[in-house]
Amino acid sequence: MMYTIIYRPSIKYCNYRCEYCPFSKYKFDQSKVEKDKKLFKKFINFITESKNNFKIFIAPKGEILGFDYYKEGITYLSYLQNVEEIVVQTNLSNSINWVDNVNKQKLKLWITYHPNEVELNKFFSNVNELSEKYITFSVGTVGIKENLYKIKKLKLKIESIKNTKPYIWVNAYKDKKDYYSENDIDEIKKIDPHFEINIKNYKSNGLSCKTGECVFWVEGNGIIHRCYKDSVVLGNIYKDNLEDIKKSTPCRNKICTCFIGYVNIYDLQLENIYKNSLMGRII
């Protein structure tokens, strides 16, 4: 059986200080790093010993690629026969030399650009280097209007990449109602032609969804949820069999606002757009 596991590390830490992100408020704590390291090792052992096949999406609470145990663990997972794909969210602020050792057929990076945290040329240099290393990835950012001119500059730079050009996505800023004018939307669609997919809040209640059936949200301690917005505990990945847990049930939430949630709604058929990696947001 093929399952998609969205793994949520226990550690909350980021080297960036974006105002809109809650994880920027946490300080480095070595004891929590050691705890997280043990939990991730346990997860790796579970995947290694499992008879099931997996697509793994690591969705950190901040930035994890500054920690060697994640780079080493991801590299190891990428060579397992029962791992079809491993997607990692990252701000690309750390050295990328580690990808030289990874299985490039399986690693996919979901890269976030933070205009107020990193100089554009430095960020693009890393993006371009990734492309030269033949890593598959997408690049995106939050569509803060004050940053649109920087995002447009990034788009122009990415157009100059000689190898396969990554898809650039824009996450709609949804903290303020009616934040975008029609002109704003038109301008953003020039950057991300699929922006209108993300700007919507999907009325998901009662809709058929892959979560809980073949897609699971797994906390660092093994606790399993249907998705990021569903607090109901389905079991523990280290104690319960996914075959016994999986169940096709309609969504219980009123709306679904986040990409890693609504991509699993069957009716949207977004795998027809993100053909090279649904969870990696790669078209």
Image (cartoon, rainbow, N blue to C red):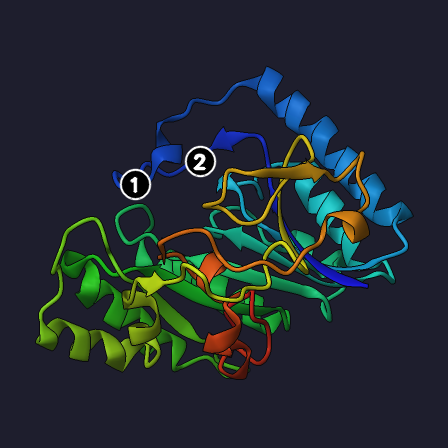
Q: Residues within 10 Å of mark 1 (few under 14, many from 20)?
A: some
Name the residue that disc number 2 marks.
14
Residue positioned 39% across, 72% down in the render:
168
Count all numbered tags in the image, as a single digit. Answer: 2
Identify the secondary structure beneath mark 1: loop
Left or right relative to 153: residue 129 = right
Examine the rendered structure and indicate whether residue 59 appears above or below residue 222. Answer: below
Q: Are marks 1 and 2 in contact (CB under 8 Å)?
A: yes
Query: Which residue sits at x=52%, y=60%?
Result: 250
Three-letter amino acid code at disc 1?
Cys
Q: Amino acid at mark 2?
A: Cys
Residue at image coords 82%, 63%: 1
Vertical relation: 73 (above or below) 100: above
> Can residue 166 be seen?
no
Identify the residue position indicated by label 1 in the image: 18
Return the x and y of residue 162 as percentages of the image width and height.
50, 83
Instruction: Using a 10 Å C-alpha cutoff, classify the residue at mark 2 as few (fewer than 14 neighbours), some (14 to 19) or many (20 or more).
Output: many
